Every structure is written in structure tokens, then in C-alpha cells.
Image (cartoon, helix red, strand yellow):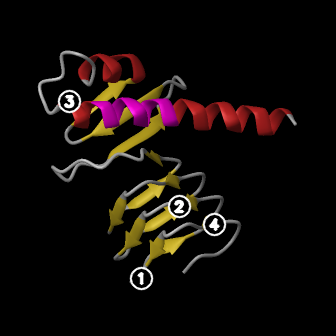
Amino acid sequence: RVFGSARVFGAARVTGNAHVFGEARVADNAHVCGCSRVCGEAQVFGTAKIDGATVERWRVLPVTDPRGYTAYAARNESGEWMIRAGCRAFSIENARVHWGESYAGARWIGDQYLAGLDWLLAQEEQTVIKKAE
């Protein structure tokens, strides 16, 4: 079910007993399934798959990780973006270091995460411009 001001577009899918509502956006090839709830200002893009989770105010970065990790971003109590991928949480700065030149994994995976961080900051910039208009 998709309701409220929520939007699902591109090749995105919402299946099963999943609900997308509020101001949420699901796009590209993302898949929301099971008993998932995507709501508030959440954004789920790229090839992200949300299965049986509640995502509110989180932004799912458009990263395809063959290990099955999904990268999420949300603001902490101080207003700073925190990135969660796998079992780790990073500030933007620490995430850039982790997935940067010295990344121990495959370079193309690190590059995707770095591009995801750039995407996140570009989304934020677009939001600021729209609010100013």
C-alpha cells in the first residue's frame, strides 16, 4: 500500500504487506517488501531492499554491495549525518576514510559507498534549495 504524500516511481516495487506513507520516496529499482514500513521523510533509492523493517527519516544510500549490506543515513541528536552499513556506524568524515584509498575490500565497492555519500549530500543540497524557493 502506498498512501498519503508518499511516492513510488521508476522501477521501484512495493509488495507483500509493505506500506509506504507520509512524505516517503521509493525510487529506481528499490524493493520494499514483507511487513516493512517506509514512512516520514525516508528515502529508499538505488537497488536497496527493505524487508520486514521500519524505515522512518532514514535515507537508504544507492549502493549495491554483493555482501548484502544496505547503507542507511540518518541524523543523530546533534544533527550530524550518521551512516550505518553492516555492523558499523560512521560520521560522513569517518565513512570517507573507511571507504577511501586504504579500503581493505574491493575498490569498486568502496567507490560505490563514496558515491553514495556524495548522493546523500547532493540530496540534502537539493532539499535546502527547494525549501528556500
Q: Secondary structure at mark 2?
A: loop
Q: Earlier in the sequence, mark 2 or mark 4?
A: 4
Q: Which residue is mark 1?
A: 17
Judge depth for marks 1 and 3 and give the one in front.
Answer: 3
In the picture provided, is 132 more to the left or to the right than 58? Answer: right
Contact, CB < 8 Å: mark 3 with mark 4?
A: no
Q: Residue at x 48, y 69 (%)?
A: 12
Q: Which residue is mark 2?
A: 27
Amino acid type at mark 2 = Ala
Disc 2 to disc 3, how far (Cα)? 26 Å
Report if the CB atoms under discs 2 and 4 are less than 8 Å apart.
yes
* Helix, strand or loop at mark 4: strand
What amino acid type should be assigned to the residue bearing mark 4? Arg
Residue 116 lies within the magenta run: yes
Mark 3 or 4: the one toward you: 3
- The residue pinned by badge 4 equals 7
Q: Of circles 2 and 4, which is in front? A: 2
Does the CB distance between marks 2 and 3 fall below 8 Å? no
Q: Residue at x 52, y 22 (%)?
A: 78
Is the residue 70 above or below the residue 118 in the image? below
Q: 117 or 108: which is nearer to us?
A: 108
Between 125 and 1, the one lying in front of the other is 125
Height in image: 33 above or below 77?
below
